[in-house]
Image: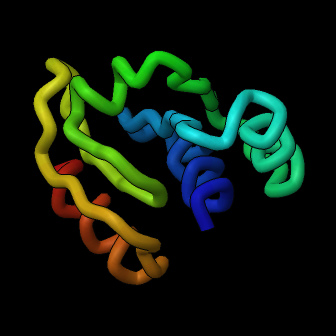
Amino acid sequence: MWERIYKEMKASKKNVAFVGVGLFDGIPNSRSFVQRHQLTFPNVYDGDGSVAKRYGFVGQPYTAWIDARGNVIRQGFGPTDEPAFRALLTRVMQ
């Protein structure tokens, strides 16, 4: 889902960015996840937890909607289904 929506947004030149942040599992497992799911949007590993601390998350999966100034617009734990993800994406892009 993430990759498909990322590609749609990129193709339509929407002003939105996707960034995956790996925690806890180590770099090799994070890389394996990215490769296994064929993710092409930027992914990083937060080894020291600074990103997690900045945005207030302590587990995965976690979704944060962050505006261009770095303010968290919405956040939540757990998987997100595609209709809910698309609805929120539409709302925050308005």
Please give the name of the residue rendered at 87% of the width and 54% of the height, measured from the top-left corner: 36
Residue 44 vertical placement versus 9 (above, below): above
Residue 24 vertical placement versus 6 (above, below): above
> Toward the viewer: 5 or 80?
80
Q: Where is residue 28 in the image (x, y as percent from the top left)?
A: 83, 32
Q: Quadrant of residue 16?
A: top left
Q: In this view, does 16 lie to the left or right of 19?
A: left
Please give the name of the residue rendered at 23% of the width and 33% of the height, measured from the top-left corner: 55
> Toward the viewer: 10 or 57?
57
Q: In which quarter of the image is residue 89?
A: bottom left
Q: In this view, does 10 lie to the left or right of 82?
A: right
Q: In this view, does 53 lie to the left or right of 14?
A: left
> Toward the viewer: 45 or 65?
45
Q: Quadrant of residue 24?
A: top right
Q: Position of residue 72 (x, y in %)?
A: 14, 38
Residue 20 in sight in this render: no
Colour scheme in the image?
rainbow
> Toward the viewer: 16 or 22?
22
Q: In this view, does 51 lie to the left or right of 25?
A: left
Across the whole image, how many numbered discs are drawn on residues? 0
What is the quadrant of the N terminus in the image? bottom right
Residue 24 in sight in this render: yes
Residue 40 vertical placement versus 49 (above, below): below
Residue 67 vertical placement versus 78 (above, below): above
Please give the name of the residue rendered at 25% of the width and 66% of the height, measured from the top-left corner: 88
Q: Position of residue 76 (x, y in %)?
A: 25, 61
